[in-house]
Image (cartoon, rainbow, N blue to C red):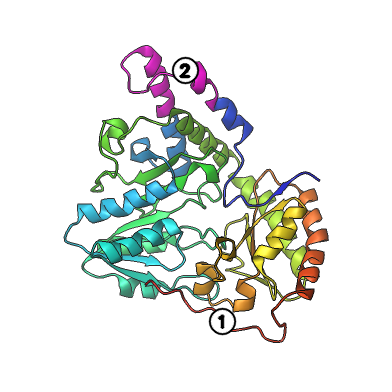
Amino acid sequence: MSTIYMDNNATTKVDPQVLDEMLPYFSELYGNPSSMHRFGGEVGGKITEARERVAKLLGCEPREIIFTACGTESDNTAIRSALNAQPGKKHIVTTRVEHPAILSLCKHLEKREGYEVTFLNVDTDGNLNLNDLKAAIRDDTAVVSVMWANNETGVIFPVEEIGAICREKGVMFHTDAVQAVGKIPMNLSEMPIDMLSLSGHKLHAPKGVGALYVRKALPFRPFMVGGHQERGRRAGTENTTGIIALGRACEIAGEHIAEENDSVKALRDKLETGLMESIADAKLNGDKEKRLPNTSNISFGYVEGEAILLMMDQLSICASSGSACTSGSLEPSHVLRAMGVPFTFAHGSIRFSLSRFNTEEEVDFIIENLPRVIENLRKISPFSAKDSGPACTPRSTE
């Protein structure tokens, strides 16, 4: 069997329709979209179309979309804009399970730039206690940043309720929606969200392009300063082909939302059921209902995720580990640590993230072959099945 790719939360293949849309702008229509002549203006018109397509998927106005290079830039821009627009406020609220694009920035701001950050805990299912959020917000809180959906477990946070709390308290609310955009319906015009980040390569556009939604009339301070591009909100010559691709990818994603929540979810559920029934000491991580339709994070007790991935790779199966073992550390995922997953399970966590390009035959192949992989690894595992080990404690912010 050819490669079975189930690591779509890491990156997705470029949809062939997206590739077809962007190809002419590499060679035939290569003008600068900011140029005054018609040759460049034609390209500029295509960027306008892309902006409209992204806005339609999100349910917002095109003028509220700023194109960026990636989700990380969008996250950094949102947080720093909120801080720079409110110089008297030195407090940030986020969670312990955010993507490193948020966590690393917040820790940097705390250690290097004099800000104070409250990192909220989650429960064993990966859910946030809204009472903890309410209690964390202070008079000097500049921004609350909570992801829409977790990249490792797929757990969906109640962003509408979070936004309402922030709106009531007069605090800006940003959500990293990199994993959620294109997988679940959104209508930002009806939601109390001030800023939202997304990245093209998570929804079948190429790497190197992203976007930031900024609610109209929200005070905004640009991160990139220079030319007049993006109405002065993000300087730099536009990544024309990437932006065009993102627009088309968003259009296609909107057409496939129902499929994402039906066919893809059915494949995910079949995969989960098959593995949980055939492999002892397997644990599903995260809320079983409130999660993305494509994401499954399963811990296989008493084996290491890195070893599982290596054995799966020999079978041409691509997934990812919830452990940081591949970076040379024996420390489990910060998300699973925050959820208190036992040590010997956290180390054996595998994230399967599907897309509409996956098939039932691929799922059947994994269900047939992965149990044997786990069985063989347990025979040589240093962990004792009689000792589940200590629960993981929340990661320190230091």
The range drawn in magenta is 22-48
Q: Any mark on residue 29, and which? A: 2
x 42%, y 33%: residue = 52
Residue type at tag 2: Leu
Looking at the rendered structure, the secondary structure element under dot 1 is loop
Residue 211: x and y in percent read 41, 42
Instruction: List the residue tagged with mark 1.
Output: 391
Q: Is residue 28 magenta?
A: yes
- Could you say whether the residue bearing mark 2 is in a helix, strand or loop? loop
Query: In 3D space, how far apart are the residues under numbered discs 1 and 2 (Cα atoms)?
Result: 57 Å
Task: Categorize mark 1 by other alpha carbons within 10 Å: few (<14), some (14-19), many (20+).
Answer: some
Q: What is the count of numbered marks?
A: 2
Decide if residue 259 is on the left or right side of residue 151. Answer: right
- In the rendered image, residue 42 lying in the magenta stretch gets the answer yes
In this picture, is 162 found above or below 4?
below
- In the rendered image, the residue lying farthest to the front is 328
Residue 31 occupies quadrant: top left
Picture residue at 52% right of the left edge, 73% below the top: 337
Above or below — where is 45 with respect to 356? above
In the rendered view, would you say 46 is above or below 262? above
Say if 212 sits above or below 166 in the image.
Answer: above
Instruction: Give the mark nearest the N terminus, 1 or 2.
Output: 2
**Residue at x-position 69% and y-position 59%:** 309
Query: Which is nearer the eye, 23 or 250?
Result: 23
Place of residue 97 in the rendered image (x, y in percent of width and height, measured from the top left): 47, 66
In the image, 269 versus 90, the foreground residue is: 90
Which residue: 61% across, 30% down? Answer: 17
- Name which quarter of the figure residue 373 lies in: bottom right
x, y percent for residue 383: 69, 79
Name of the residue lying farthest toward the bottom:
386
Mark 1–mark 2 CB contact (< 8 Å): no
